[in-house]
Image: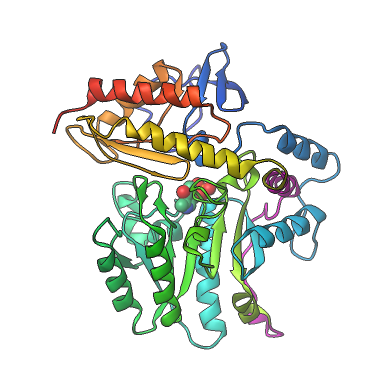
Amino acid sequence: MNRSAVWHPFTQHAAEPAMPSIARTGGAHLETADGRRILDAISSWWVVTHGHRHPAIVEAIRKTADSLDQIIFAGLTHEPAERLANALIGLAPSGLDWVFYSDSGSTSVEVALKMALGYFRNIGAPRSRIVAMEHSYHGDTIGAMSVGARGVFNAAYEPLLFEVDTIPFPAAGREQETLDRFEAVSRDRSAAALIAEPLVLGAGGMLMYPAWVLAELKKIAEASGTLFIADEVMTGWGRTGTLFACEQASISPDILCTSKGLTGGAIPLAATLATDAIFQAHYSVDRKKTFFHSSSYTANPIACAAALANAEIWRDEPVTERIAALSARQAAGLRRFRDNPFFTDSRATGTIAALDLRAGSAGYLAEIGPKLRAFFLERGLLVRPLGNVLYLLPPYCITGNELDGLYDAIEEAGERFGSRP
Ligand SMILES: *Cc1c(COP(=O)(O)O)cnc(C)c1O
């Protein structure tokens, strides 16, 4: 058998050309087995923050593997997990005092939903409804899909998904509709939680909304005793310009999910942070109030050490300055497109820049997607549009010249594939 036995994620194998095999990574680049360099403009699906194989993270992984591998995390603990939890509490918005480890963004969301329902049940005032935002994405497990946007991605599994209350995306000029709808669905105090991606909805098309809306949502949640779950799986670790996006609204969520950039993108790990009130609702001599959740690889020591190294990079290196410089470059890059007839809605939040290509048909399955991907790959650029939405979400070590090259290629793509209004 010559063919590969690998079934790839989000991949229609019948339509996919042969895939390059990556043999090496470093900084903002991937390198194929035959030595071709590819600029990773999407941080390998939003995970790599500082750059591929940051030396301090590689060293932490190496060193920890000398003394520790996976250990059961019920009834036992270890130093990397303890130190990381303290570091996370120090870095996260105030009031998040407990850290529950898991292994992927989807799992961190499942954990958040279970914490919210467990909280209300354990305090003797059960609530089970979840409020979610239109166009949001929270992962691909059944619970995470249930609270995310419905569409072609999950049509086959729809019968398994639970009902949620959906509030509209706070599009510019229509923010009040979102707030009014949330007010209406939470008024009867039956909603356990609002789950939302703060400031930027990633997989939904890099949709952006302002911090004041986030602050207002939190206020409404508080007024009705609804928990606020911030899914910072993509937005965390500097993407939006601050370590966590919630900081820009000066809010502390009741529950915060983090994964992707948690280890700098080197190795899988996730954490769900919660307030003391949520922990205390599960703290009891009554064993029925236990938080019944575990993943086999919970708090993997090597992954925790990588995340700790990441936290130290944030402490020791001028990461904030790097992010500010990248954010300014992204804003400048987008300015080129103000009068470009082939694009609309150019937008940026922190290090994330996005713009919509005017093309015949929009949506994720638009034929244009694979063509654009191939166009960029021919030029040694890893860009993976969401339908007709082009975005750059690069590692923070990308240079100004490299970004200029990306914007040149986007301009060229507009002329090649775009249509005029
Ligand atoms: C990627 C993502 C997830 C899911 O994370 P996985 O690690 O892929 O399971 C959840 N929420 C958001 C906002 C994401 O971007």
| 170 left or right of 9 in image | left
Q: Which residues are magenta?
A: 284-312
Query: Can you see residue 15?
Result: no
| 228 left or right of 335 in image | right
- Residue 13 % position (x, y): 38, 29
| 87 left or right of 236 in image | right
User: Residue at (55%, 58%) from the top-left corner?
Assistant: 257
- Residue 101 % position (x, y): 65, 58
Q: Is residue 38 above or below residue 68?
A: above
Q: Nearer the viewer, residue 316 or 191?
A: 316
Query: Can you see residue 251?
Result: yes
Q: Is residue 368 magenta?
A: no
User: Residue at (24%, 61%) from the top-left corner?
Assistant: 174
| 68 left or right of 176 in image | right
- How many numbered marks have been drawn onto this rendered protein structure? 0
Determine the image quadrant of residue 218: bottom left
Furthest residue to the right? Answer: 67
Q: Is residue 83 above or below residue 61?
A: below
- Residue 307 % position (x, y): 69, 47
Q: Is residue 286 magenta?
A: yes
Q: Nearer the viewer, residue 402 or 188?
A: 402
